Amino acid sequence: MIGPDDTGSAGVEAMQWQRRRRLWDAALDFLVPPRCVGCGRRGADVCQSCSDAIQPLGPAICPRCARPSLEGRICDRCRTQLRALRAVLAAYPFEGVIRAAILAFKYRRCTRLAGFLAPALLEVLRSRPLSVDLIVPVPLSQARRSERGFNQSELLARNLATQLSRPLEAAALVRLRDTPQQTRLPARERRRNVADAFGVADPAVVAGRRILLVDDVCTTGATLEACASALDRAGAQAVWAVVVAREA
């Protein structure tokens, strides 16, 4: 079994990029203190007041998809549909300060917000422990990763793998084809958009293993389900997902 940092050249490049980014951020903060993504006040990416105001998802959610559900029961959709993904665990609703932080993290390259967002994943798993063998981030296409400079899911997954002392397999899943961004599509088209869009680089790495997928946001769940299906076809024993936020 590999260790958390044994992720090949892609992982080494990602860590080097993160170090350079931290140095640049420190220099920039000295010259121009950051603004809070919530209220805009200077001094921190998320000020203490905005951080204290964030409310986690309550108990009235489906234990399989994390959507609102009366008294926390399994919702009708999850009761009637068989899926490769056993459950989605989520920390917050995708709104307010959390939404602003995630969007800044992904699209404004505020990568240090990973340090603010990643602990939410650990808290969810503390309240609902899972026995997992591998941590696997949802992959980006090569074009999107090159454009963005990083994979936000991998940054979150790397932090979580370190905290859980579990191996990170950053390259386990690969994009087999580029797909339009899910945010640009109606909900009904998202599942079709990502169908068969993912594959497993080396089935031997995931076969018989219990996998924890990591992503920043779950909207319809189509991307996570497509990833879980690819892992299931490759012989994974079980697949769960954990995300920072869940869109209702």
Image (cartoon, rainbow, N blue to C red):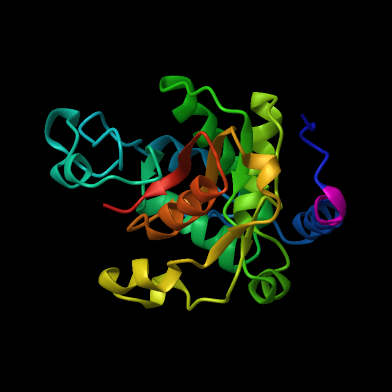
Q: Residue at x 32, y 53 (%)?
A: 247
The secondary structure that dominates the magenta segment is helix
Q: Residue at x 87, y 54 (%)?
A: 9
Q: Is residue 198 left or right of residue 83?
A: right
The answer to if 101 sits in the magenta stretch is no
Task: Please provide percent x and percent y for residue 160.
Answer: 63, 35
Q: Is residue 133 visible?
A: yes
Residue 17, given in percent of the width and then of the height, sits at 83, 57
Q: Which residues are magenta?
A: 8-13
Q: Pinpoint residue 116: horizontal percent, then vertical percent.
A: 58, 42
Specify whether residue 40 is in view. no
5, 34: nearer the viewer: 5
Quarter where residue 195 is shown: bottom left
Left/right of residue 165 with respect to residue 103 in the rendered view: right
Q: Quadrant of the N terminus?
A: top right
Instruction: Using residue 88 as the reference point, say whether residue 177 is left or right of it.
Output: right
- Give the total number of marks visible in the rendering: 0
On the image, the x and y values in percent for residue 95 come to 35, 53
Above or below 230: residue 75: above
Residue placed most toward the observer, 117 or 16: 16
